[in-house]
Image: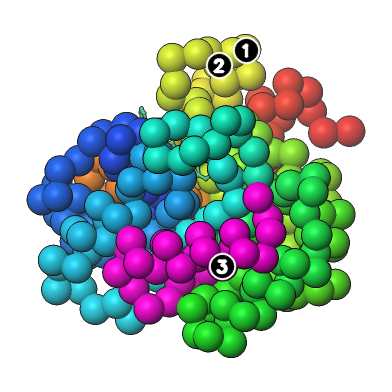
Amino acid sequence: MIESQFSKLISGTMSWGAWGKNFNFYEMQRLIENTVDLGITSFDHADIYGGYTLESAFGDAFSRTDISRSAVQFISKCGIQLTGSNRPNTVKHYDCSKAYIISSAEASLKHLKTEYLDALLIHRPSPLMDPNEVMEAVHQLKKEGKIINFGVSNFTPSQVDLLSKEAAVDVNQIEFSAVQHQALFDGSLDQMLTHKIIPMAWAPLGHIFSLETTPQKKRVLEVLEGLSTTYNASSDQLLLAWILKHPSGVHPVIGTTNLKRIEASVGAVSIALTTEDWFRILEASQGYEVP
Ligand SMILES: NC(=O)c1ccc[n+]([C@@H]2O[C@H](COP(=O)([O-])OP(=O)(O)OC[C@H]3O[C@@H](n4cnc5c(N)ncnc54)[C@H](OP(=O)(O)O)[C@@H]3O)[C@@H](O)[C@H]2O)c1
Protein backbone atom coordinates (compact mmCIF):
# COMPACT_ATOMS: atom_id res chain seq x y z
CA MET A 1 0.00 0.00 0.00
CA ILE A 2 1.35 3.42 -0.96
CA GLU A 3 2.22 5.65 1.99
CA SER A 4 0.05 8.76 2.22
CA GLN A 5 -0.48 11.77 4.44
CA PHE A 6 -4.16 12.09 3.44
CA SER A 7 -7.07 10.65 5.41
CA LYS A 8 -8.30 7.30 4.06
CA LEU A 9 -11.54 8.96 2.93
CA ILE A 10 -11.33 12.42 1.41
CA SER A 11 -14.22 14.85 1.57
CA GLY A 12 -15.11 16.21 -1.89
CA THR A 13 -16.46 19.75 -1.77
CA MET A 14 -17.71 20.07 -5.35
CA SER A 15 -21.41 20.19 -4.45
CA TRP A 16 -21.20 22.19 -1.20
CA GLY A 17 -21.88 25.54 -2.84
CA ALA A 18 -23.35 26.95 -6.02
CA TRP A 19 -22.96 23.62 -7.87
CA GLY A 20 -25.25 21.79 -5.48
CA LYS A 21 -26.35 22.27 -1.92
CA ASN A 22 -25.78 26.03 -1.63
CA PHE A 23 -24.79 25.72 2.03
CA ASN A 24 -24.66 28.94 3.99
CA PHE A 25 -21.70 29.92 6.13
CA TYR A 26 -22.94 28.11 9.28
CA GLU A 27 -23.96 24.93 7.46
CA MET A 28 -20.53 24.78 5.87
CA GLN A 29 -18.79 25.35 9.20
CA ARG A 30 -20.83 22.56 10.82
CA LEU A 31 -20.15 20.19 7.92
CA ILE A 32 -16.40 20.81 8.18
CA GLU A 33 -16.48 20.20 11.97
CA ASN A 34 -18.60 17.05 11.68
CA THR A 35 -16.44 15.68 8.88
CA VAL A 36 -13.22 16.22 10.83
CA ASP A 37 -14.82 14.74 13.98
CA LEU A 38 -15.40 11.58 11.97
CA GLY A 39 -11.70 11.38 11.11
CA ILE A 40 -11.97 12.69 7.55
CA THR A 41 -9.32 15.39 7.60
CA SER A 42 -8.55 15.81 3.88
CA PHE A 43 -10.72 18.13 1.75
CA ASP A 44 -10.75 18.03 -2.03
CA HIS A 45 -11.24 21.35 -3.84
CA ALA A 46 -10.78 22.84 -7.29
CA ASP A 47 -10.57 26.50 -8.25
CA ILE A 48 -13.61 26.03 -10.52
CA TYR A 49 -16.05 24.59 -7.94
CA GLY A 50 -19.14 26.72 -7.62
CA GLY A 51 -18.01 28.72 -10.66
CA TYR A 52 -14.82 29.85 -8.85
CA THR A 53 -16.70 30.67 -5.60
CA LEU A 54 -16.51 27.59 -3.38
CA GLU A 55 -12.92 27.84 -2.12
CA SER A 56 -13.57 31.27 -0.74
CA ALA A 57 -16.82 30.22 1.01
CA PHE A 58 -15.05 27.17 2.46
CA GLY A 59 -12.09 29.30 3.58
CA ASP A 60 -14.42 31.69 5.43
CA ALA A 61 -16.21 28.80 7.14
CA PHE A 62 -13.00 26.95 8.00
CA SER A 63 -11.42 30.01 9.56
CA ARG A 64 -14.35 30.22 12.01
CA THR A 65 -13.80 26.66 13.29
CA ASP A 66 -11.37 25.80 16.09
CA ILE A 67 -9.66 23.25 13.87
CA SER A 68 -5.95 23.82 13.45
CA ARG A 69 -4.70 24.07 9.88
CA SER A 70 -2.07 21.43 10.62
CA ALA A 71 -4.83 18.93 11.52
CA VAL A 72 -6.32 19.00 8.01
CA GLN A 73 -5.13 18.68 4.44
CA PHE A 74 -6.30 20.85 1.55
CA ILE A 75 -6.10 19.56 -2.01
CA SER A 76 -6.89 21.86 -4.90
CA LYS A 77 -6.81 21.66 -8.68
CA CYS A 78 -6.21 24.12 -11.46
CA GLY A 79 -6.04 24.34 -15.23
CA ILE A 80 -9.68 24.42 -16.32
CA GLN A 81 -10.79 27.76 -17.72
CA LEU A 82 -14.58 28.03 -17.64
CA THR A 83 -16.79 30.55 -19.34
CA GLY A 84 -19.30 32.44 -17.21
CA SER A 85 -19.64 35.55 -15.13
CA ASN A 86 -16.40 35.01 -13.16
CA ARG A 87 -14.11 34.69 -16.18
CA PRO A 88 -13.79 36.64 -19.44
CA ASN A 89 -13.30 33.39 -21.42
CA THR A 90 -15.27 32.94 -24.64
CA VAL A 91 -14.70 29.18 -24.85
CA LYS A 92 -14.03 26.54 -22.19
CA HIS A 93 -10.41 25.49 -22.38
CA TYR A 94 -7.41 24.26 -20.39
CA ASP A 95 -4.41 26.38 -19.39
CA CYS A 96 -1.31 24.64 -18.08
CA SER A 97 1.09 27.54 -18.59
CA LYS A 98 3.57 28.38 -15.83
CA ALA A 99 1.98 31.76 -15.17
CA TYR A 100 -1.53 30.35 -14.97
CA ILE A 101 -0.62 27.45 -12.65
CA ILE A 102 1.16 29.83 -10.28
CA SER A 103 -1.59 32.45 -10.31
CA SER A 104 -4.28 29.83 -9.81
CA ALA A 105 -2.44 28.20 -6.87
CA GLU A 106 -1.93 31.62 -5.29
CA ALA A 107 -5.64 32.42 -5.72
CA SER A 108 -6.55 29.11 -4.04
CA LEU A 109 -4.26 29.99 -1.10
CA LYS A 110 -5.92 33.36 -0.76
CA HIS A 111 -9.46 31.96 -0.99
CA LEU A 112 -8.81 29.07 1.38
CA LYS A 113 -7.00 31.46 3.74
CA THR A 114 -3.99 29.21 4.02
CA GLU A 115 -0.25 29.52 3.53
CA TYR A 116 0.08 26.23 1.68
CA LEU A 117 -1.80 23.48 -0.19
CA ASP A 118 -1.11 19.89 0.81
CA ALA A 119 -1.52 19.04 -2.87
CA LEU A 120 -2.03 20.97 -6.07
CA LEU A 121 -3.30 18.90 -9.01
CA ILE A 122 -3.54 19.70 -12.70
CA HIS A 123 -7.27 19.07 -13.15
CA ARG A 124 -7.28 17.71 -16.72
CA PRO A 125 -4.49 16.92 -19.17
CA SER A 126 -4.22 19.62 -21.81
CA PRO A 127 -3.15 18.62 -25.32
CA LEU A 128 -1.10 21.83 -25.30
CA MET A 129 0.64 21.11 -21.98
CA ASP A 130 4.39 21.75 -22.03
CA PRO A 131 6.00 19.56 -19.32
CA ASN A 132 8.83 22.10 -18.87
CA GLU A 133 6.43 24.90 -18.03
CA VAL A 134 4.54 22.72 -15.57
CA MET A 135 7.82 21.71 -13.95
CA GLU A 136 8.95 25.31 -13.59
CA ALA A 137 5.67 26.24 -11.91
CA VAL A 138 5.80 23.24 -9.57
CA HIS A 139 9.41 23.85 -8.59
CA GLN A 140 8.73 27.50 -7.86
CA LEU A 141 5.59 26.77 -5.81
CA LYS A 142 7.39 24.06 -3.84
CA LYS A 143 10.44 26.26 -3.25
CA GLU A 144 8.22 29.01 -1.90
CA GLY A 145 6.47 26.52 0.41
CA LYS A 146 3.13 27.12 -1.30
CA ILE A 147 2.52 23.47 -2.17
CA ILE A 148 3.68 20.30 -0.43
CA ASN A 149 2.71 17.74 -3.07
CA PHE A 150 2.15 18.03 -6.79
CA GLY A 151 -0.22 15.82 -8.70
CA VAL A 152 -2.54 15.36 -11.63
CA SER A 153 -6.11 14.33 -12.23
CA ASN A 154 -7.63 12.30 -15.06
CA PHE A 155 -4.19 11.66 -16.57
CA THR A 156 -3.46 8.44 -18.48
CA PRO A 157 -0.21 6.59 -17.67
CA SER A 158 1.55 8.09 -20.70
CA GLN A 159 0.45 11.59 -19.70
CA VAL A 160 1.80 10.97 -16.19
CA ASP A 161 5.09 9.77 -17.77
CA LEU A 162 5.29 12.99 -19.75
CA LEU A 163 5.34 15.04 -16.55
CA SER A 164 7.24 12.55 -14.36
CA LYS A 165 10.39 13.19 -16.40
CA GLU A 166 10.30 16.81 -15.28
CA ALA A 167 8.68 16.86 -11.83
CA ALA A 168 7.74 14.22 -9.27
CA VAL A 169 4.05 13.33 -9.59
CA ASP A 170 2.82 12.53 -6.08
CA VAL A 171 -0.93 12.06 -6.72
CA ASN A 172 -3.26 11.01 -9.56
CA GLN A 173 -6.96 11.57 -8.93
CA ILE A 174 -9.00 9.50 -11.36
CA GLU A 175 -12.57 8.39 -11.81
CA PHE A 176 -12.68 4.92 -10.28
CA SER A 177 -15.47 2.76 -8.94
CA ALA A 178 -17.03 -0.66 -9.36
CA VAL A 179 -18.99 0.85 -12.26
CA GLN A 180 -16.10 2.74 -13.89
CA HIS A 181 -13.13 0.42 -13.36
CA GLN A 182 -11.02 1.07 -16.43
CA ALA A 183 -8.08 2.10 -14.21
CA LEU A 184 -7.65 -1.54 -13.20
CA PHE A 185 -6.88 -2.56 -16.74
CA ASP A 186 -5.38 0.46 -18.55
CA GLY A 187 -2.19 0.58 -16.49
CA SER A 188 -3.23 3.57 -14.33
CA LEU A 189 -3.28 1.78 -11.00
CA ASP A 190 -0.28 -0.39 -11.98
CA GLN A 191 1.70 2.77 -12.63
CA MET A 192 0.65 4.28 -9.30
CA LEU A 193 1.77 1.14 -7.45
CA THR A 194 5.07 1.02 -9.35
CA HIS A 195 5.94 4.66 -8.80
CA LYS A 196 4.25 5.13 -5.39
CA ILE A 197 1.86 7.75 -6.77
CA ILE A 198 -1.02 8.27 -4.32
CA PRO A 199 -4.28 7.18 -6.01
CA MET A 200 -7.50 9.10 -5.31
CA ALA A 201 -10.88 8.05 -6.72
CA TRP A 202 -13.58 10.53 -7.66
CA ALA A 203 -17.21 9.42 -8.15
CA PRO A 204 -16.43 6.37 -5.99
CA LEU A 205 -20.10 5.34 -6.09
CA GLY A 206 -20.07 5.30 -9.88
CA HIS A 207 -23.17 7.55 -10.14
CA ILE A 208 -25.13 4.45 -9.19
CA PHE A 209 -27.73 6.44 -7.27
CA SER A 210 -28.36 8.98 -10.03
CA LEU A 211 -31.71 8.96 -11.79
CA GLU A 212 -30.24 7.55 -14.98
CA THR A 213 -30.28 3.75 -14.76
CA THR A 214 -28.39 1.43 -17.07
CA PRO A 215 -28.34 -2.39 -17.32
CA GLN A 216 -24.82 -2.30 -15.81
CA LYS A 217 -25.92 -0.27 -12.75
CA LYS A 218 -28.94 -2.56 -12.29
CA ARG A 219 -26.71 -5.66 -12.29
CA VAL A 220 -24.29 -4.13 -9.78
CA LEU A 221 -27.08 -2.93 -7.47
CA GLU A 222 -28.66 -6.37 -7.53
CA VAL A 223 -25.41 -8.02 -6.42
CA LEU A 224 -24.83 -5.34 -3.76
CA GLU A 225 -28.33 -5.86 -2.39
CA GLY A 226 -27.63 -9.59 -2.19
CA LEU A 227 -24.39 -8.95 -0.28
CA SER A 228 -25.84 -6.39 2.11
CA THR A 229 -27.10 -9.03 4.56
CA THR A 230 -23.82 -10.96 4.52
CA TYR A 231 -21.83 -7.84 5.43
CA ASN A 232 -24.59 -6.01 7.32
CA ALA A 233 -23.74 -3.08 5.06
CA SER A 234 -25.52 -0.74 2.65
CA SER A 235 -24.85 -0.63 -1.09
CA ASP A 236 -22.85 2.62 -0.83
CA GLN A 237 -20.65 1.08 1.88
CA LEU A 238 -20.00 -1.99 -0.26
CA LEU A 239 -19.05 0.18 -3.24
CA LEU A 240 -16.44 1.96 -1.09
CA ALA A 241 -15.21 -1.35 0.38
CA TRP A 242 -14.73 -2.58 -3.21
CA ILE A 243 -12.39 0.33 -3.98
CA LEU A 244 -10.59 0.05 -0.65
CA LYS A 245 -9.61 -3.56 -1.34
CA HIS A 246 -7.22 -2.53 -4.12
CA PRO A 247 -3.60 -3.03 -2.96
CA SER A 248 -2.54 0.50 -3.95
CA GLY A 249 -4.59 1.97 -1.10
CA VAL A 250 -6.90 4.16 -3.19
CA HIS A 251 -8.42 7.12 -1.32
CA PRO A 252 -12.12 7.47 -2.21
CA VAL A 253 -13.12 11.13 -2.58
CA ILE A 254 -16.67 11.05 -1.26
CA GLY A 255 -19.19 13.57 -2.52
CA THR A 256 -22.06 13.16 -0.10
CA THR A 257 -22.83 16.02 2.27
CA ASN A 258 -25.35 13.98 4.25
CA LEU A 259 -24.00 13.31 7.75
CA LYS A 260 -25.54 9.85 8.03
CA ARG A 261 -23.99 8.87 4.70
CA ILE A 262 -20.62 10.31 5.70
CA GLU A 263 -20.77 8.23 8.90
CA ALA A 264 -21.71 5.16 6.84
CA SER A 265 -18.75 5.85 4.52
CA VAL A 266 -16.39 5.79 7.51
CA GLY A 267 -17.91 2.43 8.48
CA ALA A 268 -16.99 1.10 5.03
CA VAL A 269 -13.29 1.33 5.86
CA SER A 270 -13.58 -1.67 8.20
CA ILE A 271 -15.52 -3.86 5.76
CA ALA A 272 -13.27 -6.60 4.37
CA LEU A 273 -14.81 -7.97 1.18
CA THR A 274 -13.75 -11.51 0.35
CA THR A 275 -11.88 -11.98 -2.91
CA GLU A 276 -14.84 -13.89 -4.33
CA ASP A 277 -17.30 -11.12 -3.47
CA TRP A 278 -14.94 -8.52 -4.98
CA PHE A 279 -14.95 -10.49 -8.23
CA ARG A 280 -18.72 -11.05 -7.95
CA ILE A 281 -19.16 -7.25 -8.08
CA LEU A 282 -16.65 -6.90 -10.93
CA GLU A 283 -18.46 -9.62 -12.88
CA ALA A 284 -21.80 -7.86 -12.41
CA SER A 285 -20.27 -4.62 -13.60
CA GLN A 286 -18.62 -6.14 -16.66
CA GLY A 287 -21.59 -8.33 -17.48
CA TYR A 288 -19.38 -11.38 -17.94
CA GLU A 289 -17.09 -13.53 -15.82
CA VAL A 290 -13.35 -12.96 -15.95
CA PRO A 291 -11.64 -15.07 -18.63
N1 LIG B 1 -10.88 15.29 -10.36
C1 LIG B 1 -12.00 15.39 -11.02
O1 LIG B 1 -12.03 15.57 -12.24
C2 LIG B 1 -13.29 15.27 -10.27
C3 LIG B 1 -14.50 15.14 -10.96
C4 LIG B 1 -15.67 15.02 -10.21
C5 LIG B 1 -15.62 15.04 -8.82
N2 LIG B 1 -14.41 15.19 -8.18
C6 LIG B 1 -14.32 15.19 -6.70
O2 LIG B 1 -14.90 13.99 -6.22
C7 LIG B 1 -15.91 14.28 -5.25
C8 LIG B 1 -16.94 13.20 -5.24
O3 LIG B 1 -17.55 13.05 -6.50
P1 LIG B 1 -19.05 12.59 -6.60
O4 LIG B 1 -19.90 13.61 -5.96
O5 LIG B 1 -19.32 12.22 -8.01
O6 LIG B 1 -18.98 11.31 -5.65
P2 LIG B 1 -19.86 10.18 -5.07
O7 LIG B 1 -19.50 10.09 -3.64
O8 LIG B 1 -19.64 8.97 -5.93
O9 LIG B 1 -21.38 10.62 -5.28
C9 LIG B 1 -22.02 11.44 -4.41
C10 LIG B 1 -23.47 11.54 -4.83
O10 LIG B 1 -24.15 10.32 -4.55
C11 LIG B 1 -25.26 10.58 -3.70
N3 LIG B 1 -25.39 9.44 -2.76
C12 LIG B 1 -24.44 8.94 -1.95
N4 LIG B 1 -24.93 7.87 -1.26
C13 LIG B 1 -26.20 7.71 -1.67
C14 LIG B 1 -27.21 6.79 -1.33
N5 LIG B 1 -27.01 5.81 -0.45
N6 LIG B 1 -28.40 6.93 -1.93
C15 LIG B 1 -28.64 7.90 -2.81
N7 LIG B 1 -27.70 8.83 -3.17
C16 LIG B 1 -26.50 8.71 -2.61
C17 LIG B 1 -24.92 11.87 -2.98
O11 LIG B 1 -26.09 12.55 -2.60
P3 LIG B 1 -26.19 13.27 -1.15
O12 LIG B 1 -25.22 14.40 -1.14
O13 LIG B 1 -27.60 13.72 -1.11
O14 LIG B 1 -25.87 12.22 -0.14
C18 LIG B 1 -24.13 12.62 -4.04
O15 LIG B 1 -25.02 13.29 -4.91
C19 LIG B 1 -16.39 15.69 -5.62
O16 LIG B 1 -16.97 16.37 -4.54
C20 LIG B 1 -15.10 16.33 -6.04
O17 LIG B 1 -14.37 16.78 -4.90
C21 LIG B 1 -13.26 15.29 -8.88
| Disc 2 residue crowd, few under 14, some 14–19, many 20+, Cα 10 Å | some
Nearer the observer, 207 or 77: 77
- x and y percent of residue 290 in the render? 82, 33
* Quarter of the figure with residue 36: bottom left
Nearer the observer, 33 or 223: 33
Residue appearing at x 39%, y 33% in the figure: 85
Give the vertical position of 60 relative to 209 (above or below).
Answer: below
Residue appearing at x 44%, y 56% in the figure: 44
Tell me the mark number nearer the camera, choosing from 3 and 2. 3
Specify the segment rendered in magenta: 95-119
Nearer the observer, 114 or 42: 114
Q: Mark 3 CB in 8 Å range of ligand 1?
A: no
- x and y percent of residue 223 in the render? 55, 26
* Quarter of the figure with residue 167: bottom right
Q: Earlier in the sequence, mark 1 or mark 3?
A: 3
Nearer the observer, 143 or 171: 143
Q: In the image, which disc is placed on residue 218?
A: 2
Q: Indicate yes or no whether the magenta region holds residue 291.
A: no
In the image, taking residue 57 as reference, residue 75 lies left or right, namely right
- x and y percent of residue 154 in the render? 67, 47
Mark 3 and mark 1 in contact (Cβ < 8 Å)? no
| Residue type highlighted by circle 1 | Pro
